[in-house]
Image: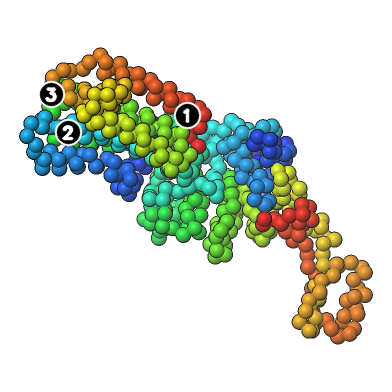
Amino acid sequence: MKNTAVIFRKQLSDTLKNKTILIQFLMFPVLVIIMENLVRIEDMPEHFFVKLFAVMFVGMAPLTCMSAIISEEKEKNTLRVLMMSNVRPAEYLIGVGAYVFVMCSAGMAVFAAVGGYSGTGLVQFIAVMSAGIILSELTGAVIGVFSRNQMTATSVTVPVMMIFSFLPMLSMFNDTVRNAARITYSQQISDLINGIGTSGVTAESVIVIAVNAVIAAALFVIVYRRKGLE
Amino acid sequence: MAGSIKAEKIAKSFGNRAVLDGIDLDIQSGEIFGLLGPSGAGKTTLIRILTGQLRQDSGTALITGTDTRRLSGNDRRRFGITMDDFGVYERLSCYENLKIFAGIYGAGKREINEVLAKVGLTGAAKTSAGKLSKGMTGRLKLARAFMTDPDILFLDEPTSGLDPVSAAEIHKMILDEKKRGKTVFLTTHTMTEAEKLCGNIALLNEGRIVEYGRPEEICRRYDHQRRLKIHLKDGSDIEIPHTAGSAGTVAELIGSGKAETIHTTEPDLETVFMELTGKELSA
């Protein structure tokens, strides 16, 4: 627990100095404030940009940050120093994961405020966003552990991140894309966010998210066993 | 027992390539031990085995009496390591870098400031590690190794690529640690560094120790390499083996008034290594 807190604080100290990570946390929350206040289109659904950007944020920020942080530490051999200093792999991963979750929660708070969620709707929004953030973190951790260096991590992260963050948006315009996207957790997160206050939680969403979580966890175990953290 | 390092018949291969083959070491507490060898000789692999980062295929390694395959968290606190490829957090300041490890080891501000002062980085405490010179980065890595005030320091090529002034500063820190009774395990391919710092050395070549002992003793064993260097008045130099038979040549050069100065040259570790392996130590 002590080492997890150390890793968490280390990441916090690095936040303002690491522009690559910082931009991931800030981009969509800032964009949603701007777009919701400046863009007015007739017949546009209420809080359209909140729902759109919240899903893109969930698919992009946690995934990119986890893979970037882990792969950078592997590339620069700072992770090996931590392991040599009695930090256990689980302590490290939980520390980084908790940091990314807290930072993304700050972004989530912006979306919730701009979207005007309250009461049960707010609870649902937080629950759905949290599930998405955790799943994206797990996917990012798989890529980070798999990659030897940042370049490899980026080349894997970008296509994966594009699938999870952009498919829900593209599926609004094309039924074929929508049918394909239904098997991804980010599409289900999008559906759940759009259904807050109306259709509620569907069994399909819960099952798809659970299956995605099991696959991501299994992949993590396989990659971790083969590659370790060094 | 505290501060001692022992290895018996350590062997390690990567695939079909034997990197270490039957390594025996017996390093006493408070000693500076130097492991010398060219790049690829197996020095870093041996350090990784001795510090529990890597498992040997066979043999036993003991550090302060504990098998390196069973090191606990407390055992690890008793040695500090700097490896050439160990990184620092470049965006964080020197102080913030050390704060991470202070947090892990349960140390506080006082200890951080002490190690910063010890390595001469107090003035650079707020400087980002990425903006430090190579010498200062080396000192920051040393500060990290000093954090737990360990009994043993493993220093893998600590002066590699440093200018002579920075290297001398690190040499002084190493000698200071010896004065405090600490054991230092040093790898280097610089013979002058080994001769200056180490009580005992081992010459490692292709995974095997080819010589072991005090530097001056090793050099004495190869006394047949001793030579006479004669500087002639015309500005040229000649070198001849220092044997009984060379007396005639010397007498002739002195008699004819050609010789200006005559020196004996002792074999150094580089020469010894060349004779043993046919390779240069600094290769």
Report helix, strand or loop for mark 2: helix
The label on residue A141 is: none
Tell me the mark number nearer the camera, choosing from 2 and 3: 2
- Chain containing the residue with disc 1: A
The picture quadrant where one finds residue B54 is top right
Tell me the mark number nearer the camera, choosing from 1 and 2: 2
In the image, is B227 to the left or to the right of B214? right
Query: Which sits earlier in the primary sequence, circle 2 or circle 3?
Result: 2
- Chain containing the residue with disc 2: A
Q: Where is residue A137 in the image (x, y as percent from the top left)?
A: 34, 31
Query: Which sits earlier in the primary sequence, circle 1 or circle 3?
Result: 3
Where is A214 relative to B234, above or below? above
The label on residue A119 is: 3
Residue at horizontal 55 percent and vertical 60 percent from the top: B162
Residue at horizontal 64 percent and vertical 39 percent from the top: B1
In the image, is A66 to the left or to the right of A173? right
Residue holding disc 1: A224
Residue holding disc 2: A50
The picture quadrant where one finds residue A1 is top left
| Circle 2/circle 3 CB separation < 8 Å | no
Report helix, strand or loop for mark 1: helix
Q: Which amino acid does label 1 sit on?
A: Tyr
Neighbours of disc 1 within 10 Å: few (<14), some (14-19), many (20+): some
Q: Position of residue B234 (x, y in %)?
A: 78, 84
> Foreground: A109 or A201?
A201
Where is A72 relative to A183, above or below? below
